[in-house]
Amino acid sequence: MNTHDEDFMRRAFDAATRTKRDGGNEPIGAVIVRDGKILAIGANEVTTSCDPTAHAEMVAIRQATSNLKSSDLRGATLYSTLQPCGMCTMAMIWSKVSRIVYGAGRDDVHQMYFEDRHMDTLDYINDAYRDDISLEGGVLKPECAGLYNPPEADVPVEEQGNL
Ligand SMILES: [Zn+2]
């Protein structure tokens, strides 16, 4: 873990809390940092923008690359409150993010937040052509996991977005 990981994760946590409170979106937040500077703060906007691709990580990547006028985020770290899904993981590989840090992992929360049953999408990182991307989970894990339904929660089917 790096010195400021918890500080940046806290910013992602705040973004997650805000998007739930203000828009009723699932509370997921993401922050992109390079050279100690925040390039973008994104939050899940799927419900408010009627866009299934508007995950917090995607929103943050679009904001950062747009601000930089470059699609290359090499050297940047992306913080997410929840283990990224396959779509976001692929987007991070394509955007050349160097480091991925997440709070709660898929075993810490209900399966409703993930798209697949068995495959761990973070295996994509291991299978990617790139060898300059690293991954770390569990930063502020208790706080981040507290944003979500726990694994054993009895969530009504109509509230499970992945079914
Ligand atoms: Zn995602």
Image (cartoon, helix red, strand yellow):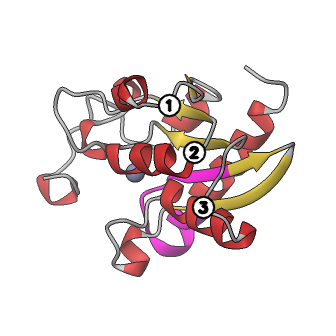
Q: Amino acid at mark 3?
A: Ser
| Residue identified by numbered label 2 | 96
Q: Earlier in the sequence, mark 2 or mark 3?
A: 3
Expressed as whole percent of the image width and height from the top left, the position of residue 116 reads 19, 38
Q: Nearer the viewer, residue 113 or 40?
A: 40
Q: Earlier in the sequence, mark 1 or mark 3?
A: 3
Let me know if residue 64 is in the magenta part. Answer: no
Q: Amino acid at mark 2?
A: Lys
Direction from residue 70 to residue 89 in the image, left or right: left
| Residue identified by numbered label 3 | 71
Whether label 1 lies within 8 Å of ligand 1 gets the answer no
Quadrant of the image occupied by residue 5: top right
Quadrant of the image occupied by residue 52: bottom left
| Residue identified by numbered label 1 | 130
Which segment is the magenta one? 18-31
Residue at disc 2, secondary structure: loop
